[in-house]
Amino acid sequence: MESLKMKRNAQKGFTLVEIAIVLVIIGLLLGGVLKGQEMINSAKIKADTDALVGLQAAAYAYRDRTGYYPGDGDATNGKDGQINFSTVVAGTAASTDGSDFFYDLAQQGFLKSEDPSTEWGGIFAAGYVASAANGSGTITGKNQVCITNITDEDAELIATGMDSKLDDGDGTTGVVRFDNYGSGTNVDLDICLEI
């Protein structure tokens, strides 16, 4: 009985080997979680990059089929080669003048639905921008398709990843542009691809 008490009193902590094994296991678990998050972000970036490229290709195919861009032309402006600004808000495509980029693509069978959605909570938009305010991510003087109002905490990572896949990785040059608005939890990022 006394030897049992002596054994219990002699072992009062973990050995260095036991602690090292626990630390290795914790490190492997953390590494797996971080790698998993990286893979999820990469998949979302790929999905939205593919969606932008798909909209760009659909716009070109629509133009080849009809002779003008989707969303180009209404009773006021006619078909001037400039896509009228269209956006998808709350699952409904809406344009400022009744000529809608997304509706036109859906009607010709280039989109399954006229209200596409993004992986990051942003909003798809398309149009011609004559001039940009605030040095925005839009490309002035060009038709473009954009994901706007990206408010995810990884917005800069998203935009840089998408720009790297499609262009030069610099949000101020090339056929892909992006810009952040706001700061802290109020970040609002736009990324646009030239059509």
Image (tube, rainbow, N blue to C red):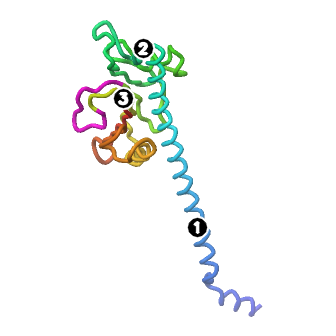
The residue nearer to you, when weighing 149 against 106, is 106
As drawn, the label of residue 26 is 1
Determine the secondary structure under disc 1. Answer: helix
Point out the tag, 3 or 2, that comes first from the N-terminus. 2
Distance between the alpha carbons at the discs numbered 3 and 2? 18 Å
The residue carrying pointer 2 sits among few (fewer than 14), some (14 to 19) or many (20 or more) residues within 10 Å by Cα, namely few
Q: Seen in the image, is 24 located left or right of residue 72?
A: right
| Identity of the residue drawn at 41% across and 34% down | 122
User: Label 3 belongs to which residue?
Assistant: 144
User: Label 2 belongs to which residue?
Assistant: 67
Q: Which stretch appears magenta?
A: 127-139
Indicate the position of residue 154 as horizontal and vertical percent values: 41, 47
Residue that sits furthest to the right in the current view: 1
Residue 32 seen in the current view: yes
Of badges 2 and 1, nearer the viewer stands 2
- Give the amino acid type for the residue marked by disc 2 in the picture: Gly
- Give the amino acid type for the residue marked by disc 1 in the picture: Ile
| Identity of the residue drawn at 36% across and 37% down | 175
Q: Seen in the image, is 120 located left or right of residue 140?
A: right
Determine the secondary structure under disc 3. Answer: strand
The residue nearer to you, when weighing 71 against 11, is 71
136 falls in the magenta region: yes
Determine the secondary structure under disc 2. Answer: loop
3 falls in the magenta region: no
